[in-house]
Image (cartoon, rainbow, N blue to C red):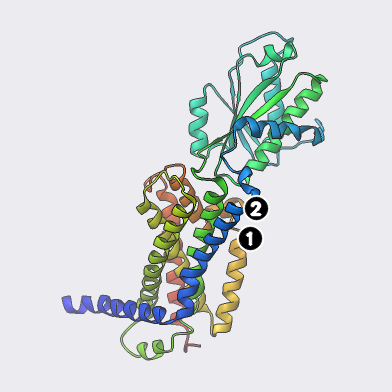
Amino acid sequence: MAEVLTKPSRRIRNMVAKELRLIIKDKVAIILIFLLPAALIGMLWYVTETSSMGDMQMGRGIEEVGEDLNLNMTAINPIDLNETTTDVGLILGIVDLDTTETFEYDLSENLTAYFELIADEIIIYDNTADAYRDLYEADIDAYIVIPDGFEANLTINEPTYIEVHYDGNDFLGAATIQGVVQGATIMFRVSKLWIRSEVFPGMIIEFAPGGGFLEAIFGGFIVIFSSYLGIAMTSAQSIVGDTPLRRMLLTPTNRLEVIVAKVIGYVIIGFLQSLLLVTLWVLAFSLELNTSFISLVIIMSLSALTGSATGILISAIASTRLQANQMFLFVLFATLILSGFFIDVGALNDILPMNQGLRLLVDTAFKGLTLMQVYDRILVLVGFSVFAMLAASFIFARKPTLG
């Protein structure tokens, strides 16, 4: 009985070894998996070292950013108070610390009302600690601190600063947050016909990646992109391009064992790729991580697992190599468009594997979350991989021949 139980595991082990030999012999596949991602990181390093984009990174002072924002405030048209502008999808926290009462009505509450007019939702906090925690847990997109003395300063035509705290890893949300804050403060000033009295938003970046914003965030995107789609690209040919598999299927080997063996083989390659990518990413940009190197490799290996399962599903569906290439191109462009890195994709951001992989990487590397704290996202990646493998096995089992 024990011998019977070990036969499937022995067959899978032999098929994994066979798959690894085939991958290693394919020089083009090795180049695509290892050298091209390394070249992408090298190009990013070259661009950030030689261009003037360094001025856009997180090393700039908060005061300098605040000055730039206020220089551009006059170029923004006031928003019509009669229009409903609650479609930005932004959740703002407000911490009102102002205790002064020198105006005919509460100016800090009046400013908050303008934020409510533009933002999708406003949450009032009693202290900054609670707001900071909710920002950390992504329950809010940003929080604004109205300091004590706000009303008193404006009453005597003295400038005052409000603090805008937002997540430095939110690449897309930063522009929206700045636009909402500038729009609300302009509406607030225009309503009072103030010229000398100013409200200066000071942008304070929380959880900023150590070593550089562009290198950390865009570099992380390249790392996940290479891990997920690089493995998917090569594994998309793993069934339609596997001639020895025809003979193997004449043995007692079932289709699920073939799928599992191929996934394991490509995950091993993905693990080695992860070691290279994470090492290059961290060393090339001198990143200061808030998690262990092992955690990053585990996350990258999960990304490789989803990429392997995706590619093998494509290969199971396709009848020829040409079909597999065409299907992969569709997956490639769809993944880029829906990655959530360039545009907000809503609920899809919580489902798609590459999106989850990027969020896992950022939250652990820069926010310092442990793997146990993001276990729900890990389960999403594992669940997607299992579903893709079962679907590939089901489709493969019903194909009469291999293309």
Question: Could you say which quadrant of the image residue 99 lies in?
Answer: top right
Look at label 2 and name its amino acid. Ile
Q: Residue at x 52, y 25 (%)?
A: 128
- Residue 333 position (above or below residue 245): above
Rendering coords of residue 42 (x, y %): 53, 61
- Position of the N terminus by quadrant: bottom left
State the residue in front, 19 or 206: 206
Residue that mark 1 sits on = 337
Residue that mark 2 sits on = 343
Question: Could you say which quadrant of the image residue 184 lies in?
Answer: top right
- Residue 48 position (above or below residue 199): below
In the visual, does 212 lie left or right of 76?
left
Q: Residue furthest top?
A: 102
| Secondary structure state at the residue bearing disc 2 | loop
Tell me if label 2 and label 1 are in contact, CB under 8 Å: yes
State the residue in front, 110 or 218: 218
Look at label 1 and name its amino acid. Ile
